[in-house]
Image (cartoon, rainbow, N blue to C red):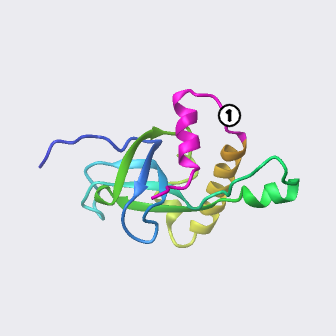
Amino acid sequence: PEAKMGVFKNGKVVIVLNGRFAGRKAVVVKASDDGNDTKKFGHALVAGIDRYPRKVVRAMGKAKLEKRCKIKPFVKVLNFNHMMPTRYSVDIDLKKVVDENSIAQATINDTRKTVKKMFEEKYKTQSAKTDKKSTGVSYFFNKLRF
């Protein structure tokens, strides 16, 4: 019907607008512009952060640091209308972990655990560089203030 824009590319950071995770940031894992048999609308498989890591300072001990770096992820299929693209993208490779089969009721917990590991790993190893991807990563791990 209308012209396709293709804004939701893989690795793009989006903000979820509706539902339980409204106001949370997520990364597009796989976008499907024209929909498929079951979902006849443009949608994307996203992995996002439900509970963000807390602020850390140098004075904190190891255990406290560990505790504050924890992330609670979510994995979900979203309609394009219910998310807003940002100008940031990240290079977290979730393709192997998250797919249509892995968000089935039986396997979703394992998927979440793996995503959690990957997110926490990325969060701990992010650099202070100013290249495009790393600014996207630091933006992704910060809570949206509004």
Identify the secondary structure beneath mark 1: loop
Magenta stretch holds residue 91: no
Q: Quadrant of the C terminus?
A: bottom left
Closest to the observer: 103 or 64?
Answer: 64
Q: Is residue 61 left or right of residue 6?
A: right
Question: What residue appears at the point 61 percent right and 59 percent down from the top-left corner?
Answer: 52
Question: What residue appears at the point 80 percent right and 56 percent down from the top-left corner?
Answer: 66
Question: What residue appears at the point 42 percent right and 48 percent down from the top-left corner?
Answer: 30
Whether residue 92 is visible to the viewer of this picture, yes or no, is no
Question: What residue appears at the point 67 percent right and 38 percent down from the top-left corner?
Answer: 126
Q: How many numbered marks, from 0 up?
A: 1
Residue carrying label 1: 127
Amino acid residing under circle 1:
Ser
Residue 28 pos. (x, y %): 44, 48
Which quadrant of the structure image shows residue 81? bottom left
Q: Is residue 46 left or right of residue 34?
A: right
Whether residue 82 is visible to the viewer of this picture, yes or no, is yes
Residue 125 pos. (x, y %): 71, 40
- Crowding at mark 1 (Cα within 10 Å: few <14, some 14-19, many 20+): few
Q: Is residue 42 above or below residue 11?
A: below
Residue 16 pos. (x, y %): 41, 59
Closest to the observer: 141 or 98?
Answer: 141
Magenta stretch holds residue 144: yes
What stretch of residues is rendered in magenta? 125-146
Residue 104 pos. (x, y %): 50, 68
Q: Is residue 88 above or below residue 71?
A: above
Q: Is residue 129 left or right of residue 26?
A: right
